[in-house]
Image (tube, rainbow, N blue to C red):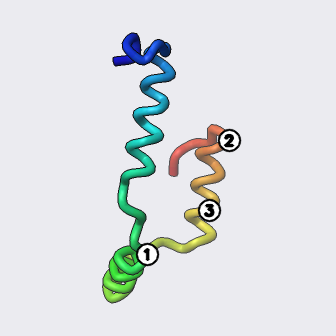
Amino acid sequence: MARARRMSLAEWVRQALQLARRSEPGRDYRKKLEVVRAAVQHEFPSGDIETMLEEIENGYVGGTRP
């Protein structure tokens, strides 16, 4: 198809992806909001925020695991 249109394969792929992206239906914020509302109805255990942030920071700088 690319050759028939006298374009490179890479250009043909780019155009095909752009067309696919444009034809995809828009994202519905209501569905996302519904999911978030359902999720906040549950209670899950969570660690102390300061401890979690410290563990994350240690991971970034190559610290040891707790």
Q: How busy is the neighbourhood of tag 1: few (under 14 within 10 Å), some, or many (20 plus)?
A: few
Which disc is residue 61 wearing? 2
Residue 44 seen from this side: no
Q: CA distance from mark 2 to mark 1?
A: 37 Å
Lateral position of residue 52 relative to residue 40, left or right: right
Discs 2/1, front? 1
Q: Is label 3 in a helix, a strand or a loop? A: helix
Q: Amino acid at mark 1?
A: Tyr
Residue 59 seen from this side: yes
Relative image position of residue 60 (x, y in whole percent): 64, 44
Relative image position of residue 48 (x, y in whole percent): 54, 74
Q: Residue at x 63, y 69 (%)?
A: 50
Relative image position of residue 44 (x, y in whole percent): 35, 78
Quadrant of residue 5 in the image? top left
Q: How busy is the neighbourhood of tag 3: few (under 14 within 10 Å), some, or many (20 plus)?
A: few
- Marks 3/2 in contact by CB < 8 Å: the verdict is no
The residue at which mark 3 appears reads as 53
Q: Residue at x 63, y 48 (%)?
A: 58
In the figure, 57 relative to 46: above or below? Answer: above
Viewer-proximal residue among 24 and 61 = 24
The residue at which mark 1 appears reads as 29
Relative image position of residue 32 (x, y in whole percent): 39, 74
Q: Amino acid at mark 2?
A: Val
